[in-house]
């Protein structure tokens, strides 16, 4: 039986959709069966990240009982995607989402769910359909405060949070530190992604970052997180990574990923 992982944050622009595309591709590259779903019902754009512009049948049709979930699934390289409709976005019962995709867990190892930035039934639907959650934040107070809200709601709904992804890090003194974010979120940080224009370039090329430039720090972080999520070991063989291992302390996110991997094995 597969696992559904929701990628959430009650804020736009932090990197949920990019993370779903990149992590999905990274997990698929470990030969796992992956489905990524766009559950950002009112402003979907996961399809656009992969060059899928106007799919005929989407999650919206499934939620309106006009199509079977299987008919809204498309192939993108070695993974599958269920996009949502950009134009025809009416849905009445977003909370039926979980029921509509439940049976797909038999067909996939991992289902990643992209979610809405609004605190509404769409986010709740994504949370309810997820076995576990990854929360995306950026290292600033306003975003962290919305991240903590998302975590509080997830805890009320009893959906386990496996960890936090810190995105768009500039490595500046004014940014919140990993320790501060872990303490506030009461959850381990599982990836620290620098701000990198390669992510924007990958988007412009409608390719998940992990397929677009797999040696960048962001792609390697996603791949390490993917490996931990599936309980596999991954060694970063880049020269600079080897030097880092010799001369610096193991970063906390690496320690956290090892703990997660050991739990998954
Ligand atoms: N690490 C990063 N460095 C630079 N740009 C990024 C990074 N992560 C995401 N972005 C860019 O930020 C924008 C918003 O990302 P997106 O994944 O759509 O966020 P969300 O789904 O949370 O709204 C996109 O243009 C994306 O390419
Ligand atoms: Mg998004």
Image (tube, grey):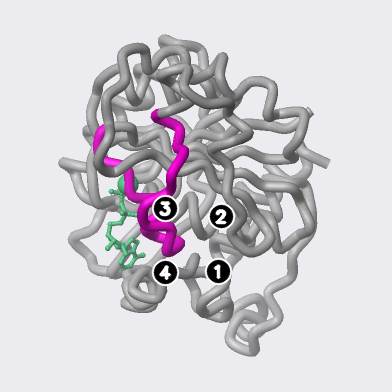
Instruction: Tell me residue 157's x, y (percent).
Output: 45, 11
Q: Which residue is mark 3?
A: 47
Q: Which residue is mark 2?
A: 23
**Which residues are drawn in magenta?**
42-60
At label 1, counting other C-alpha atoms closer than 10 Å, the crowd grade (few under 14, some 14-19, many 20 or more) is many
Question: Which of the image's four quarters has the C terminus?
Answer: top right
Task: Name the secondary structure under disc 4.
Answer: loop
User: Disc 2 and disc 3: Cα gap in Å?
Assistant: 15 Å
Q: Nearer the viewer, residue 6 or 38?
A: 38
Task: Name the secondary structure under disc 3.
Answer: helix
Q: Which residue is mark 4?
A: 206
The correct choice, above or below, for 249 with respect to 256 in the image is below
At label 4, counting other C-alpha atoms closer than 10 Å, the crowd grade (few under 14, some 14-19, many 20 or more) is some
Q: Which residue is mark 1?
A: 210
The residue located at (44%, 26%) in the rendering is: 126
Q: Nearer the viewer, residue 15 or 89?
A: 89
Q: Is residue 187 left or right of residue 139?
A: right
Task: Please report whichever mark, 2 or 3, sits nearer to the chain's N-terminal start.
Answer: 2
- Asked if the residue under mark 4 is in contact with the one under mark 3, i.e. CB atoms within 8 Å, the reply is no
Task: Please report whichever mark, 2 or 4, sits nearer to the chain's N-terminal start.
Answer: 2
User: Disc 3 and disc 1: Cα gap in Å?
Assistant: 16 Å
Dominant SS of magenta comes to loop
Point out the frontmost of discs 2 and 4: 4
The residue located at (73%, 32%) in the rendering is: 2
């Amino acid at each position: 039986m597969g696992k559904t992982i929701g990628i959430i944050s009650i804020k736009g622009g932090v990197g949920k959709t990019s993370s779903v595309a990149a992590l999905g591709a990274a997990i698929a590259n470990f030969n796992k069966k992956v489905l990524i779903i766009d559950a950002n019902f009112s402003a979907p754009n996961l399809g656009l990240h992969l060059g899928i512009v106007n799919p005929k049948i989407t999650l919206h049709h499934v939620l309106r009982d006009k199509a079977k979930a299987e008919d809204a699934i498309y192939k993108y390289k070695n993974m599958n995607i269920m996009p949502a409709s950009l134009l025809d976005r009416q849905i009445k019962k977003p909370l039926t989402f979980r029921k509509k995709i439940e049976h797909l867990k038999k067909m996939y190892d991992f289902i990643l769910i992209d979610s809405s930035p609004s605190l509404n039934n769409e986010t709740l639907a994504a949370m309810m359909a997820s076995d576990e959650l990854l929360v995306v934040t950026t290292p600033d107070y306003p975003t962290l405060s919305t991240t903590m809200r998302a975590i509080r709601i997830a805890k009320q709904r009893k959906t386990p949070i496996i960890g936090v992804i810190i995105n768009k890090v500039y490595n500046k003194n004014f940014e919140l530190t990993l320790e501060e974010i872990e303490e506030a979120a009461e959850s381990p940080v599982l990836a620290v992604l620098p701000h990198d224009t390669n992510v924007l370039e990958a988007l412009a090329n409608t390719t998940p970052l992990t397929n677009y430039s797999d040696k960048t720090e962001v792609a390697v972080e996603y791949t390490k997180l993917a490996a931990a999520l599936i309980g596999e070991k991954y060694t970063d063989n880049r020269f600079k990574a080897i030097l880092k291992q010799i001369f610096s302390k193991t970063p906390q996110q690496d320690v956290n990923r090892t703990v997660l991997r050991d739990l998954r094995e």
